[in-house]
Amino acid sequence: MVAVLALAPLALHQGVALAQPAPPPARPGQLPQGRPGQQAPAGAAAPPPAAAPATAGAPAATPQRIEVNDPALAPVPPAARTLASWNEARAIIEQRSVDLVVAVQEVARAEGSARRALAQALPNLDASGELSRLLAPGGADAPTRAAASITLRQPILAPRAWYGIGTADLAVEVAKLSLEDRRRFTLVAVADAVVSIVTTERLSEVNRVGLRSALELLELTRRRERLGTGTKLDVVRAEQDVALARATLVSGDESLRRAREALGAALGLKGEVGVPQEFSLNGIATELGSQCTQTRTDQRADVRAARGELELAERGLTDAKLAFAPYAEVSSTLGAETYFGGAAPAGGVGGVGDAGDATRSGWSWSIRAVLTVPIWDGGARYGDLRINRAVVEQQRARLGAVERSAELESTQAVRSVEVAEQARAVAEQSRDLARETARLTQVAYEAGTVTSFDLVESSRRQRQAEIDLAVREFEVVKAKISALLASASCK
């Protein structure tokens, strides 16, 4: 029994104690340093305790790290593709982002519609040719007729076509504003995806440190049981702690994979896309600050686009009213015709020539003006008026909603930075308290005043506090990026 009591302190100091003061300079279980631009949370495991003096005459025990091997401790394999910098991400966005590609083609489509609207007010020049032969009643003397003409048409009174040119040009501007807003939205999505990857990678590191600490505690508890200073219940509780840490690790790794896949989807790429360890999150904010211009909320692209949509709807109503206006055009036709292979009609071609000639040719030139006054079309124009009035009211309601949403988003984005910083400070304080609680629990457990349940529970709470702090730190970065883009113009 004396031998067992003498060996117990040695066994206690071979493992990683979860809550002893940190002896300089190194701490077992220390987490890797955070990414550039981030304040890295402290490791989940605290340093081992100082060696306790052995029985009289015995040499002092040297603290040793308990070696544990588990396949889950291996890091998540890197993604198939890795972004080198934010500029590379921006280039991929411009080339591969589905939303941006669609928005760019919408601009091209609007420009095509504008060119078509302009054509309605410009001269039209057409040429035609004709070759005919009379079959019945015909006969051997029936001539063959060949004719060609060229016609020029010019609208001289076309208020609807002229007004449509301005409407089409406005539609192009609205499409460009929608493209600008879609670019801002895509940048926000990609930046959030990058921050999410960095966050989940950090959590993956924290989870692995937590699992290693749980495994070391389990091994230490098993040694205590073999020495007779622990119970089977202590071992079972430690095994439960390991199972909980392992489940957290599995869930965190899956979150990392999904974050990588989300970044790939935002960039328009297949599969997972990761970021390197040296990727600077502060660099994202710097690059966005140089690429995007800060504006007032009412000058944001989506708000301006909504105003443009309302103006388009109002112009559509005016266009429906112009359908009642008269329309006039002038046309001039120059034609030539030839009869051959038989007797030409009496009087020849163009009133010149004698009948009976085998071949006769001639030409003609005419000019005419046509005025069209709409009178009754069954009520279609009145239906168009009702439709466009309803569209105007819809767009007016949408504009109000967009303005309120933009103002609310901007206000919340600015406030979220302060809230995120406060939450990070609280999480850091909670982490420090959890670490101190774990240390005191370890000391009390060694003194026999608490049970293994308290030891396992304090260890679990410390790991959770480390995770919460890591999440809060990256939420600060995400909040700053969101606040930067909340009222930005990204062209």
Image (cartoon, rainbow, N blue to C red):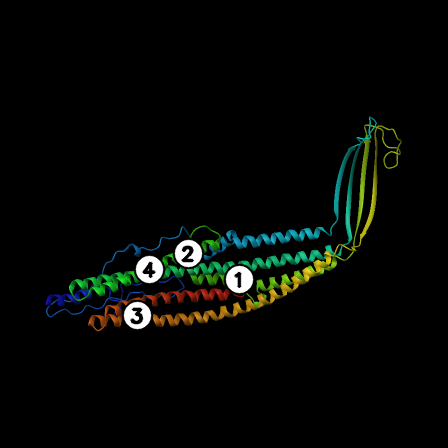
Q: Secondary structure at mark 3?
A: helix
**Residue behind mark 2:** 258
Disc on the earlier residue, 4 or 3:
4
Q: Secondary structure at mark 2?
A: helix
Disc on the earlier residue, 3 or 2:
2
| Residue 32 appears in the picture as rendered | no
Name the residue type under label 4. Answer: Ala
Name the residue type under label 2. Answer: Arg
Please give the name of the residue rendered at 44% of the width and 71% of the height, measured from the top-left corner.
419
In the image, residue 282 lies at what x, y percent? Answer: 44, 63
Name the residue type under label 1. Answer: Cys
Please give the name of the residue rendered at 60% of the width and 54% of the height, measured from the top-left corner.
107
| Distance (Cα) linking label 1 and label 3 | 42 Å
| Distance (Cα) linking label 3 and label 2 | 31 Å
Q: Are marks 4 and 1 in contact (CB under 8 Å)?
A: no
Give the camera-side residue of 78 and 231.
231
| Distance (Cα) linking label 2 and label 4 | 17 Å
**Residue behind mark 3:** 435
Neighbourhood count class around disc 3 (C-alpha, 10 Å): few under 14, some 14–19, many 20 upward: many
Please give the name of the residue rendered at 75% of the width and 41% of the height, measured from the top-left corner.
127
Name the residue type under label 3. Answer: Arg
User: In the picture, which quadrant includes the N terminus?
Assistant: bottom left
Q: Is residue 73 above or below residue 53?
A: above
Q: Nearer the viewer, mark 4 or mark 1?
A: 4
**Residue behind mark 4:** 247
| Distance (Cα) linking label 2 and label 1 | 28 Å
Query: Total label count?
Result: 4
Q: Nearer the viewer, mark 1 or mark 3?
A: 3
Disc on the earlier residue, 1 or 3:
1
**Residue behind mark 1:** 292
Disc on the earlier residue, 2 or 4:
4
